[in-house]
Every structure is written in C-alpha cells, then in structure tokens.
Amino acid sequence: MSAKNKSDQVVIAGAGPVGLTAAYALLRHGIPVTLLESYADVPTDPRASTFHPPTMELLESLDVAQEVHGMGIEVPKWQFRDLKKGLVAEFDLAILGDITRYPFRLHCEQHKYAQMLLSKVEKMDGCEIRKSRNVTGVHSDENGIVAMVHGPNGTEEVAGRYLIGCDGGKSVVRHAIGVSFEGLTFEERFLVLTTPFDYTDHGFKGTCYIADPDRWYSMFKVPAEGPPGRWRVVSPVGPDLDEAAAFDDDACQARIQAVLPHPEGGTFPILHKNIYKVHQRIAGRFAVGNVFLAGDAAHINNPLGGMGLNFGIHDALNLTEKMVAVYRGDAKDDIFDLYDRQRRTVAEEYLLAQTAQNKRDLEENDPEARALRQKEWRETASNPESAREFLLRTAMFKSVERAQSIQ
C-alpha cells in the first residue's frame, strides 16, 4: 500500500497540531510524508488547550490518547457565571459517562501535543521534516502537486501526490488554489492574561464563561509545568486601545481583579500577556483537486467553547482515513468530495454557529434578554435530559454524529 517514491508522497504545509496529526496518521499506514514548516521549533506561546471527549476517542485510533491524557488535567465540570451575580449554572460531563470513556474536557496545551507528535514522526520511516520553510505557491494537475518553497537555501520545489494545507488562518495554500475565506473579523481583540493564582479554591471550575454587558470573561485552567497549574483569563479589548495600554500593569491588574478581588487584598501575579485579533471565517471549499485544507486554513473561529483545535484534528483524521483508502485501492479520488461535504458542513453548522452564539450570550447588553438567557442556563443545568442534550452539542458529539450522517 505504501507509496513507492517521492512523487507519490503527501506534502503537508504546516507542522502544527493539525498537520502533525495528519502526518502521523499517514505514516502509520506506510504513506510517506514531507512536512514543511516555517518555524524552527514548536511555538510555546499560549494557544488552544481543550480536548473534547470525541477528540480523545479519535486519538485512540493513533494510540496516543493515554499519552495525551497523561499530559493534561481533567475538567469534568464547567460553569456559566455572571460578573456581578456570580455562579449561574454548572454543567457536569459525568452525565455522559455512559457513552464515553472521557466524560470531561481534557486541558493540555497544544504545543505539548504537537511536540509529542513531532517526536514520533521524526523517527518514522518515510518522513521528511523541513523546518524554516515557507510555502509560497502551489501548482497541481492530474499527476499531482508541486509546492514552491522558500527556505534557508533559497527557493525549491517539493512534489507529491497530494498537498494538505494546514498552514493557518493566513494560509498561502488556500490563496494559491483560489479558495474564498468568507466571514468577519471582530472589532474587539482578545486579551489573555496568565496567572498562577488558583481560582479553584474560590468556587471556580476549570472552565468558566462569565457574562457581562460591559466586559465578559472566559477563564480556564491549564496544567503548565505541573500542579497547581495556571489560569488564563480572557477578555475583550477595544479596537482603538494600543498594545502598550492594553498591557499596562495597572490596567491588567484592574481587569483581573474585576473577576475576583484578591482574597488577601494583594495583586495577582501575571506571568504572560497576549493580545490577538479574532475571526469567524470558513473556506469556500476544503478540497480542490488534489489539494486540501484542514484546521485554521479551512476555518477560524473565536475560542469561546474550545472547539477550534478539536475541529482541526477531526479534519485531519477524516481526510487521512480517506487518503489511506485511496492508497490501498479501496476508494477513488472522488471520495474527497465527501471530505469537503462532511467537514465544511459541520464547520458551518456547529463550529462557527456555536462559538458565535457563545460570544453573543456573554456580551448580551439587553437586561431582559440577558436575564432570560441565564434563566435558560439554570433550567437546562437542573434538568438531566436538557443538560445531556446541551452537553452532547457543546462537547461536540452532535457534530461528529452529523458528519458521519453525510454521504
């Protein structure tokens, strides 16, 4: 089944968590891969960190689920809160324990996942990793693809049977194949403050969404280098505020104190500050001939709900399963139309829709609408059947089921 030469390899642009997932899945079936990546080492700045239950189940197919579990922390309960009123509703994923071995969100920073996969693929036969390389263009025909790549030694060409663009929201691969990326960019940006202060001792669960018409918050705990871990506190920043003002120590302290005044009247240590633009966009096609898009190259969304990384991993495993079938001779190239239908449909119906709704819920400024929404959260959480249905959607079981239903 394995490809016989370089012209039959799969070229992957981007060696982040999605590209590495695709590479590892293909290499395990003897399909050679060349990974092209602009970085010299895996970036370790704060990025995605949530693995939902269906993703953990999918990672069992790669025999890495337990390894990922060992690097993370279980978060079985999460909360909706109101900035002024406190706890509104709490949801417990244990209610799904009858259908999954992972009735929790696993929090594990994506760079740990990427580093783990990189350490595996770089030892595997048929894998070539070229770092500090930027894809600058793509040509394709019925015989395969050629990626134009700029690196330390100038421009080179890398040929293969297929190309998977996992090269992020600004994907050169997507631009090269002329695919649209419709959607919007939010006016406000998201500011992330990281602190070692443990909110768990003050009634906060490992994930909290805090509603407020003036400034909402999203908070979650990550394992960092070990117990007690660290907390990331995310909140919006206006479009006209420059970075220096956003990072001002006093301003950041006031922002974080608004969630919970320091219990001892002191200041919270802030270990890291980050600010970034937020988008909701989706590619017009995920497959064009023998070129494919996955992860942020195919869809980008706000992080409220922790779904983006998961959808990217699902993209990678859906696509590579179909590639393996084609290499084996069990399917023809038209199977990739199914990849496009399945993954683009659920990205529209679940990823973009749910994360956009999450943001609207947190920033709702109409008092009656906000009170009604919070009443719905309380009633949903208190009713086992409603809570179960709600968690099946927000924990991504419904999106997996929907993708599987599309033929």
Image (cartoon, rainbow, N blue to C red):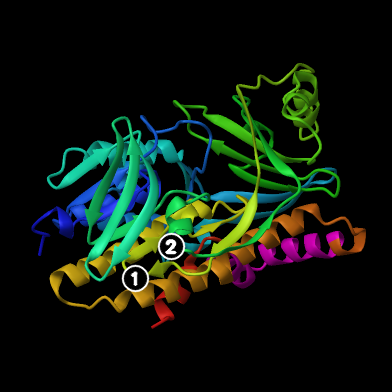
Viewer-proximal residue, 218 or 387?
218
Residue 315, image x, y percentages = 40, 61
As helix, strand or loop, the secondary structure at mark 2 comes to loop
- Tell whether 3 sits left or right of 79: left
In magenta, the rendered stretch is 370-392
For the C terminus, which image quadrant? Answer: bottom left
Circle 1 is placed at which residue position?
A: 289
- Seen in the picture, residue 266 relative to 229 is either above or below; the reply is above
- Tell whether 69 sits left or right of 245: left
As helix, strand or loop, the secondary structure at mark 1 comes to loop
Q: Residue at x 22, y 51 (%)?
A: 33
- Tell whether 309 sits left or right of 134: right
- Seen in the picture, residue 269 relative to 403 is either above or below; the reply is above
> Is residue 164 among the parts visible in the rendering?
yes
Q: Give the tally of numbered discs.
A: 2
Residue 305, image x, y percentages = 60, 54
Q: Which mark is residue 45?
A: none
Residue 379 drawn in magenta:
yes
The residue carrying pointer 2 sits among few (fewer than 14), some (14 to 19) or many (20 or more) residues within 10 Å by Cα, namely some
